[in-house]
Image (cartoon, rainbow, N blue to C red):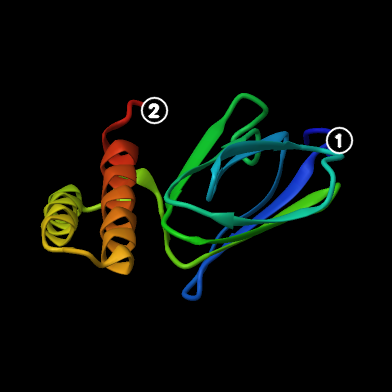
Amino acid sequence: MADETNQLRVRLVTPERTLFDHAVTAVELPAKNGYMEVLYGHAPLMAELGAGDVTLHGGPGGPESITRYNVSWGFAEVLGDRVTILASDALKPEEIDVPRAQQQLEHGHQEWDQAGDSEAAYDEALRVIAEAEAKIASATEKQ
């Protein structure tokens, strides 16, 4: 069994299921304003998640393993020895329906084109586009 000293306990949950609950050496998170990496001993913080991949280094597959989940929105609580990720939705790359994500992307572009003078409509279109692009990138990226 791997030495769990200096490892983070990471728990990734959605309203429907717990996807991951293991010790890892590092976790990369898609925070709202860009990606961040968390290591053991990180200063406590709360972060809003944006669309992208949560990448877990180490874990049940061994110290060299990498596990990814695509998230669309949520929050992460970081403490010195653990990270809790509460995601509205999270999928393994192989669970992503690429044709559906491409339809979502097209819908986002249509929303953008029809937004007119509404800043809220532009923001929603950007959210839809970012979520769809993140899903497509996650599903098509070589592991």
- Locate residue 8 relative to residue 19 in the image: left or right: right
Residue under pointer 1: 6
Give me the residue at 40% from left, 49% from top.
92
> In the figure, 76 relative to 16: above or below?
above
Tell which circle, 1 or 2, labels the residue nearer the N-terminal end.
Answer: 1
Q: Residues within 10 Å of mark 1 (few under 14, many from 20)?
A: some
Badge 1 marks a residue whose secondary structure is loop
Is the C terminus in the top left, top right, bottom left or bottom right quadrant?
top left
Image quadrant in which you'd find residue 108: bottom left
Identity, as a three-letter code, of the amino acid under mark 2: Gln
C-alpha gap between disc 1 and disc 2: 26 Å
**Percent x, y for residue 54?**
52, 44
The location of residue 124, given as percent across then percent down, is 31, 64
Q: Secondary structure at mark 2?
A: loop
Report which quarter residue 65 is drawn in: top right
Residue 143 is labelled as 2
Between 112 and 38, the one nearer to me in the picture = 112
**Horizontal arrangement in the rendering, residue 106 relative to residue 51 (left or right):** left
Image position, residue 35 (x, y; %): 56, 38
Q: Residues within 10 Å of mark 2 (few under 14, many from 20)?
A: few
